[in-house]
Image (spheres, rainbow, N blue to C red):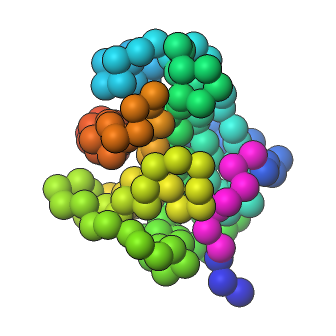
């Protein structure tokens, strides 16, 4: 059975993971504020979805309900703990096979692909690094800054992966 790209961000399963096994541990409020230039007004944490990925959603101040940063992450060890048989790399390659129009981004992780900005399936910067697959999307008031901000935030996340 093929693993589909995560399109429904808010689906949750009752998997209890320790706080250190969550995307929010890899990107702090102050780091986001430094990159995007506005405050983070609220942080939502979401437990693992059916594929074992968890999500940290940062609402940006001063941009109504439209500005945000989202980090969606899975590490191979997290998937195994959640009873999944795939690895971060296999999920990355599978998910990317369902998306069209991806742009290769050099210098970030082992492989990075940009799916564009906005609220569309496959949006964001998809990064494979070691045993981790994450998608980061910065959606600031000025959409032309989304890719650069997403790349800067991805480098912060990568520096925290051990």
Give residue 162's position: percent from left, percent from top. Answer: 32, 45
Q: 18 and 94: which one is in front?
A: 94
The overriding secondary structure of the stretch rendered in magenta is loop
Q: Tell me if residue 5 comes above or below residue 39 in the rendering.
A: below
- Position of residue 25 measured from the top left corner of the image (x, y, whole percent): 48, 31
Count every numbered label the image shows and give the total: 0
Q: Give how far across and how far down residue 60 sits, in percent.
A: 53, 21
Residue at left offset 67%, top offset 60%: 7
What residue span does the magenta drawing correspond to? 4-10
Q: Nearest the camera: 145 or 72?
A: 145
> Would residue 102 appear left or right of 97 to someone viewing this image?
left
Q: Residue furthest bottom?
A: 1
Q: Is residue 130 visible?
A: no
Residue drawn at (63%, 36%), measured in percent from left and top? 18
Dividing the picture into quarters, in which one does residue 63 lie?
Answer: top right
- Examine the rendering and report whether any part of residue 10 can be seen: yes
Q: Is residue 34 magenta?
A: no
Rendered location of residue 134, percent (x, y): 45, 53
């Amino acid at each position: 059975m093929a693993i589909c790209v995560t399109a429904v961000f808010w689906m949750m399963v009752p998997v209890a993971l320790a706080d250190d096994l969550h995307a929010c541990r890899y990107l702090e409020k102050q780091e986001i504020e430094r990159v995007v230039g506005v405050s983070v007004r609220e942080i939502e944490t979401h437990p693992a979805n059916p594929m074992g990925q968890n999500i940290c959603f940062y609402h940006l101040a001063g941009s109504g309900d439209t500005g945000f940063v989202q980090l969606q992450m899975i590490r191979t060890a997290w998937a195994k703990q959640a009873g999944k048989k795939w690895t971060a790399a296999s999920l990355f390659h599978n998910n990317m096979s369902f998306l069209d129009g991806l742009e290769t981004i050099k210098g970030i992780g082992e492989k990075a692909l940009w799916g564009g900005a906005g609220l569309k399936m496959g949006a964001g910067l998809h990064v494979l690094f070691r045993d981790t697959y994450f998608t980061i999307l910065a959606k600031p008031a000025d959409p032309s800054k989304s890719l650069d901000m997403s790349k800067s935030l991805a480098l912060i996340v990568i520096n925290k992966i051990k």
